[in-house]
Amino acid sequence: MDQAETVRTPSSWVVVGLDNGGTCNNATVLDATGQFLVDNLVENPSRVLDGPESAVEALAGAFANILELTSTPLSLVRAVGLDTPGPASAHGVISSKGATNFNQVSWHGFDIRGALEARLGLPVVYNNDGNAAALYAHHQHFGAAAAANSSVSAIVGTGLGGGVVEAGTVIRGAAGMAGELGHVQIPLHGVLEDDQPVPRCNCGFAGDVESVASLTGIRNNLLPYWLTRFPDHPLAKEPIATAAKALRGYGEKDDALALAVFGQQAKAIGKLFTIAANFTDPAAYFLGGGVVEAAPHFRQWFLNSVREATDLRDEQKAVATFALVPDRDMAGARGAAVAALNTVTPL
Ligand SMILES: [Zn+2]
């Protein structure tokens, strides 16, 4: 990769975005004019499995590295945006029960935002990764009109994340739990087959969006059912976890079982967006996650299927946009940076 073409130097003050994941941190720099200085993914080991102290040092290392890469003096940095997987409070305190990436006892109730702020000596703004991706999708799509618009993003991965953006700002909620779109329960009529068991989610709910529209939902609920309808399918011979991950490849080849499963996912997301239409009536509905990396004809079919399953009124159809979330790998770091920029220059 030619870094001369993919990295620029700042012409003004900047904010830094840090996306903390299970194995890597991804970092970016955003200048005061809204330009990202890095076009590519810049990753460093996150060391979250070594506990909070190591992980905060790794974040500080990622911060120093991205400043060096972009030749940005520390004195130009006004704020830092941080995102991590949840569950965490609105201000970056990891759940007292821990979380998938933060299961050591030392992580339980750990204030990762406060710890990084103390370590860097700069203001740190926190979002969970779904909200950061939603914020990036919103700002990328609307640009200068971000503050005048609203959106809802559904990000399909291992679970279903996302966020609700109103007037350019993420809705956080009283306990920081707004926009947990995966755990919104949806009407299943028109989604499930007559003889299909009601899908269950790891959160304890039955029939929420994540129980259908996630890799976990495919593995635990949809694929076991659909394999009974396609007993001779090649995936019937595979372990269920392997088969679930392989399903998207079959979808790209228009395999009937795969299209049945992804069709149900699209309908579930459409039901969620129908709730959103009657709740915040957003200007845009964004779809992200692994599907964005799929073959263009398949991801377009999926997006179209979601749109068809979203029941909008004529007035809403006239103004609403459906789009894929861009730059999947960088969406977290970029959204974290946008959140930081918004604290320096409020919308
Ligand atoms: Zn759930």
Image (cartoon, rainbow, N blue to C red):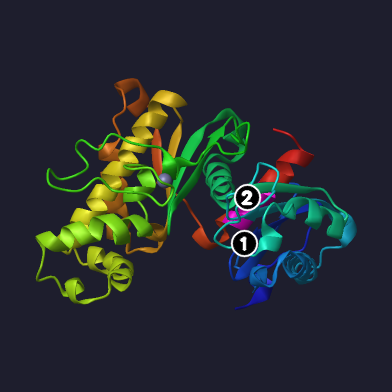
Residue 279 in the image: above or below residue 16:
above
* Residue lying at 25% horizontally and 38% vertically, measured from the top left: 188
Residue bounds of the magenta highlight: 332-338
Q: Secondary structure at mark 2?
A: loop
Residue at image position (54%, 42%) is 138
Lateral position of residue 263 relative to residue 14, left or right: left
Q: Is residue 288 visible?
A: no
Badge 2 density bin: few <14, some 14–19, many ≥20, Cα 10 Å:
some
Q: Answer yes or no: do the residues labelled 1 and 2 have beta carbons within 8 Å?
A: yes
Which amino acid, mark 2? Ser
Tell me the residue at 64%/65% (across/down): 104
Task: Label the magenta part by its dominant secondary structure.
Answer: helix
Q: Is residue 186 left or right of residue 98?
A: left
Q: Is residue 192 above or below residue 329?
A: above
Return the residue at label 2. 95
Which residue is label 1 attached to?
102
Nearer the observer, 261 or 140: 261
